C-alpha cells in the first residue's frame, strides 16, 4: 500500500482544527478539563452556527523543550489525533496540551491515550458530567 492510501479516509482538514486565538482562550476560560498521564485536554461544547463536529487544537509550550522537541511532540500528537479523531461527533472545541513525558512514550500508548481522551470528552459533553 502507498502512504497516500493510509491517510485517504482519515484526514485532519482545516474545518476540524481550532485556529483562532480567541477560540483557544474561550476553551481555556469556560471549558472543562480532563487529565491523563501524557496530556491535559480542555473541551467546550459549541452552540454558534455552523456547529458541526469536533474542532481540535494543539498547544506545545516552550517549557517542553527546544524547537526540535516541541516539533516532534506536535507531529506525534497531530498523527495520534488524525488516527483517533471521531468523525461524526457533536460540536465540541478541544485543546490538547501535551506533557514532556509524551516524548518518551511509545506511539501506541499516545494513540490509546488520545482515543480515551476523545471518549471521555464525548461522554462528559453528552451526559453533562463534571
Image (cartoon, rainbow, N blue to C red):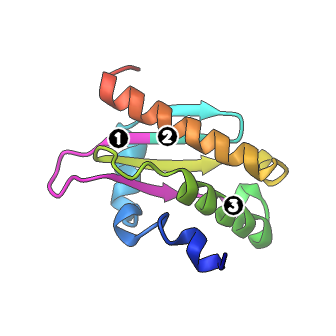
Secondary structure, mark 3, is helix
Residue 25 visible to an observer of this rendering: yes
Is 54 one of the magenta-colored residues? yes
Residue 6: image x %, image y %?
60, 69
Q: Quadrant of the N terminus?
A: bottom right
Near mark 2 (Cα within 10 A), the count class, few <14, some 14-19 or many ≥20, is: many
Q: Which residue lies under the disc numbered 1?
A: 44
**Could you say which quadrant of the image residue 128 lies in?**
top left
Give the CA separation, mark 3 to mark 1: 23 Å
Residue marked by disc 2: 118
Q: Which residues are magenta?
A: 43-61
Q: Secondary structure at mark 1?
A: strand
Marks 3 and 1, the one that precedes in the sequence = 1
Q: CA distance from mark 1 to mark 2?
A: 12 Å
Contact between marks 3 and 2 (CB within 8 A): the answer is no
The outermost residue toward the right is: 104
Which residue does the image show at 41% across and 63% down from the upper left? 17
Ranked by sequence position, the earlier of labels 3 and 2 is: 3
Amino acid at each position: 500500500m502507498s502512504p497516500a492510501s493510509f491517510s485517504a479516509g482519515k484526514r485532519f482538514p482545516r474545518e476540524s482544527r481550532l485556529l483562532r486565538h480567541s477560540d483557544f482562550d474561550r476553551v481555556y476560560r469556560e471549558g472543562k478539563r480532563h487529565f491523563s498521564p501524557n496530556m491535559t485536554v480542555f473541551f467546550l461544547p459549541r452552540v454558534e452556527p455552523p456547529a458541526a463536529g469536533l474542532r481540535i487544537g494543539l498547544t506545545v509550550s516552550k517549557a517542553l523543550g527546544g524547537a526540535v522537541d516541541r516539533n516532534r511532540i506536535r507531529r506525534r500528537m497531530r498523527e495520534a489525533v488524525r488516527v483517533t479523531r471521531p468523525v461524526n461527533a457533536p460540536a465540541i472545541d478541544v485543546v490538547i496540551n501535551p506533557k514532556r513525558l509524551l516524548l518518551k512514550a511509545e506511539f501506541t500508548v499516545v494513540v490509546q491515550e488520545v482515543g480515551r481522551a476523545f471518549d471521555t470528552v464525548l461522554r462528559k459533553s453528552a451526559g453533562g458530567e463534571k
